[in-house]
Image: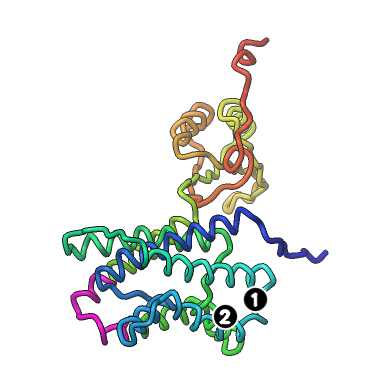
């Protein structure tokens, strides 16, 4: 059965994309532009145009993205196209607004503080944008075209485009500002990944033990976590074995270890970092056990 892709437009997506664009524009205006820091992607190109031709980035963002959207619309689904147009328009709008707000952040000409602040706020905004399915078009569309027609991975195209744009940025910034721009780019990338993956990091646990049923019962009873039993086979003995897989919060890891040790001190345990866990107990409220139930016979 073919799975139909969900192309519906959600209000929460539009709201969070708008907030992400507002945060990105704030960072670009009050940290990058104010401290003469460059940028990659389309934002970097708009900063180059601003430095050379004094054109407002709010306008150049639209001028650059419009033809790219016309070329790349056929490679975007309905939802992606709408979100991209919306994200581009919102970014341009907030760039225009922030440049006209009589407000300044005085960092006392400290470029390190400026690059860190730009990376933190810009990365947060961009991460929100991507997390809710948005994009501001630009180099993303170019990367999609390169992948479609020439088989070049999107990540590789985006990397080289950023390198070229940053090198061209040397026409209006010096080596010192470029060095701080690289610090900004690193912090920006880390925040984007952190925001996309979610601040909540769970732990996936694989347990191999002959006492799997007792351990399973204790986990479900004491931690109120769902457990999956996976059939396996010993590599040396070739005997069938049952493995336990459970996802817990980091704060529950110590208690889980105690449960395992109580039933089987020789159990094999593998702990895996889980960037995001969806489902009951993680994205939704965990089922609560009645306090008095523990006293029932």
How was the colour assigned to the protein in this rendering? Answer: rainbow
Q: Identify the mark at residue 144; answer none if there is no mark.
A: 2
Q: Residue at x 56, y 42 (%)?
A: 247
- Expressed as whole percent of the image width and height from the top left, the position of residue 136 reads 51, 71
Q: Nearer the viewer, mark 1 or mark 2?
A: 1
Task: Reply above or below: 250 against 60.
Answer: above
Q: Residue at x 39, y 65 (%)?
A: 189
In the depicted view, which residue is nearer to us: 166 or 264? 166
Q: Residue at x 56, y 65 (%)?
A: 134
- Expressed as whole percent of the image width and height from the top left, the position of residue 82 reads 64, 70
> How far apart are the alpha carbons under marks 1 and 2?
9 Å
Left or right: 203 with respect to 279? left
The magenta span reads 166-181
Left or right: 245 with respect to 203? right
Viewport quadrant of the C terminus: top right
Residue 167 part of the magenta-drawn span: yes
Q: Earlier in the sequence, mark 1 or mark 2?
A: 1
Q: Which residue is mark 1?
A: 76
Mark 1 element type? loop
Name the residue at the bottom extreme: 150
Left or right: 34 with respect to 21? left
The prevailing secondary structure element of the residues shown in magenta is: helix
Asked whether the residues under the numbered discs 1 and 2 touch, taking CB atoms below 8 Å apart as contact, a structural biologist would say yes
In the depicted view, which residue is nearer to us: 199 or 78? 78
């Amino acid at each position: 059965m073919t799975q139909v892709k969900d192309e519906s437009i959600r209000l929460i997506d539009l709201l969070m994309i708008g907030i992400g664009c507002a945060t990105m524009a704030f960072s670009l205006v009050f940290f990058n532009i104010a401290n003469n820091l460059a940028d990659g992607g389309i934002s970097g190109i708009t900063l180059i145009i601003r430095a050379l031709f004094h054109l407002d980035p709010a306008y150049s963002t639209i001028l650059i993205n419009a033809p790219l959207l016309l070329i790349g619309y056929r490679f975007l689904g309905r939802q992606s196209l709408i979100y991209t147009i919306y994200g581009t328009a919102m970014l341009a709008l907030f760039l225009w607004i922030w440049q006209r707000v009589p407000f300044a952040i005085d960092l006392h000409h400290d470029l390190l503080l400026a690059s860190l602040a730009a990376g933190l706020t810009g990365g947060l905004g961009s991460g929100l944008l991507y997390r809710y399915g948005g994009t501001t078009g630009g180099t993303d569309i170019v990367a999609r075209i390169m992948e479609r027609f020439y088989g070049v991975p999107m990540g590789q195209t985006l990397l080289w485009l950023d390198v070229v744009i940053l090198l061209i940025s040397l026409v209006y910034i010096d080596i010192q500002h470029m060095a701080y721009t690289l610090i900004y780019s690193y912090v920006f990338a880390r925040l984007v990944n952190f925001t996309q993956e979610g601040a909540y990091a769970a732990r996936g646990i694989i347990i191999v033990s002959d006492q799997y049923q007792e351990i399973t019962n204790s986990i479900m009873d004491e931690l109120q976590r769902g457990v999956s039993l996976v059939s396996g086979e010993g590599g040396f003995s070739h005997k069938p074995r049952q493995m336990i897989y459970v996802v817990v919060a980091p704060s529950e890891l110590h208690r889980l270890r105690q449960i395992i040790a109580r039933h089987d001190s020789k159990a094999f345990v593998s702990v895996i970092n889980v960037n995001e866990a969806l489902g009951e107990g993680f994205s939704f409220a965990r089922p609560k056990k009645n306090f008095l139930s523990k006293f029932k016979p």
